Amino acid sequence: MRNICIYLEFLSEAHKEQIRRTAAETGFTPHFFPLEQFEEARACLQSCEVLYAHSADLLRAAPASLQWYCCSFAGVDLYCTDPTLFANPRCLLTNSNGYGITISEHIIMALLMLMRRMPAYLEGFQTHQWAPPLPIRSICGSAFTILGTGNIGANAAQRLRGMGAARITGLSRSGRPQADFDQVLPISRLEEILPQTQFLIMALPGTPDTLHLLNRSRMALLPPTACVINVGRGSAIEQEALVEALNAGRLAGAALDVMDPEPLPPDHPLWSAKNILLTPHVSGNMTLGRTCDVNVEMFCQDLRNYAAGRPLEHLVDRARGY
């Protein structure tokens, strides 16, 4: 038998039935385990060809006969930097980046909260003070720069376009044009674009190339009216410099859903920076039902590809890190 070990917490009965149907069509047998059944999953995995999970510990226990690991999370930094996780060095790695809808809606929420001065109003609420109306800004007519033009960046661009954004510039490794953006430039032109940026949205993977991409010197190129939103990886921002820029008024605001480290220590200076919104890495995850549906569909789609000997649509290049 060709077995699949599935070790996930978010699957509904409908999702399991969808996987069973696809597995039956392709000659596989799925075995489902909740997270509290790690030992049972590990025992089953020894005779499995495919693993669908988000567990480095379970992957580390896999035999060399494992041929494909489908990570149900988008972030695969660890799997690209630690080759010892794979007993089979040729094991295929895919990820399920089905977060475009939920994370792009989080971006819009954060943008509107910054534009409409929610940090200042929240401060007033905490001290029981009725604040006067403050000047606000709008998505309509504003210019946006999005670092990362994949699923998340493209979904954010679509929603900004629908709300009247004046200009949306994307930056990616290749700089290939995409329909959702007014222009897409190679990331090498970042320093040229930052002085023209009103709102900088960061949706980047965690790789050596993105480490502190927004560092102190590049942050200084942003106009003081600019806001930064990060939903990719906390390591992409030099956080000490961000705190200093916010507290000195050299940036108008920031919204971070990702930080370095996570969880953020209680005494970290980010907590008390001016005009900042912090959320505990909740923009994605599996908290939206639609995300779970897309995740399972992507796995089933690639299971058909795998069984037919076709290239996997969501294959990760471990050398690049995404």
Image (cartoon, rainbow, N blue to C red):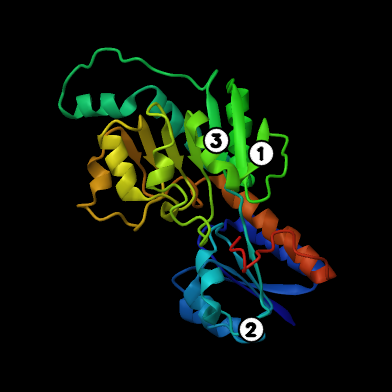
Residue occupied by mark 2: 88
The location of residue 139, given as percent across then percent down, is 51, 22
Q: Residues within 10 Å of mark 1 (few under 14, many from 20)?
A: many
The number of discs equals 3
Q: Earlier in the sequence, mark 2 or mark 1?
A: 2
Question: Type of residue at label 2?
Answer: Asn
Instruction: Determine whether the residue tagged by mark 2 lies in a helix, strand or loop.
Output: loop
Residue occupied by mark 3: 193
Q: Is residue 253 above or below residue 11?
A: above
Q: Please give left or right for residue 143 compared with residue 261 in the image.
A: right
Is any part of residue 227 visible from this angle? yes
Give the Cα separation between the discs numbered 2 and 1: 37 Å
The location of residue 192, given as percent across then percent down, is 55, 37
Q: Please give left or right for residue 68 compared with residue 204 in the image.
A: right
Give the Cα separation between the discs numbered 1 and 3: 11 Å
- Front residue of 154 and 199: 199
Question: Type of residue at label 1?
Answer: Val
Tags 1 and 3 in contact by the CB under 8 Å rule?
Answer: no
Q: Quadrant of the N terminus?
A: bottom right
Q: Is residue 165 above or below residue 317?
A: above
